[in-house]
Amino acid sequence: MNLVKPAPRYTLEELQEAYELSIPQAAQIMDKFGGEKASTDRFMRRCVRRRA
């Protein structure tokens, strides 16, 4: 019996919209973290995002 809830995950589109990423950037981050929200959010908090 598995009582642990599955970790929330991002879809490619959600990741793109949440962090204003291009498709290749979002795909690279998805590959790195498997779409796991907690790990991705922690990583993205540490990234410097430049806005034009």
Image (cartoon, grey):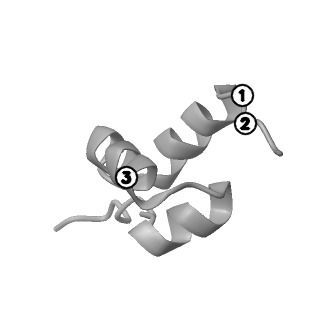
Label 1 sits on residue: 48
Label 3 sits on residue: 24
Relative horizontal placement of residue 38, taking residue 23 as reference (left or right): right
Point 62% across, 68% down: residue: 17
Q: Quick one: SS at disc 3?
A: helix
Residue 49 disc label: 2
Q: Camera-side residue: 39 or 4?
A: 39
Mark 2 in CB contact with mark 1 (< 8 angstroms):
yes
Relative horizontal placement of residue 41, taking residue 24 as reference (left or right): right
Q: Quadrant of the N terminus?
A: bottom left
Q: Camera-side residue: 16 or 35?
A: 16
Q: Quick one: SS at disc 1?
A: loop
Amino acid, disc 3: Pro
Separation of disc 3 and disc 1 at Cα? 18 Å
Separation of disc 2 and disc 1 at Cα? 4 Å
View extreme (right): residue: 52
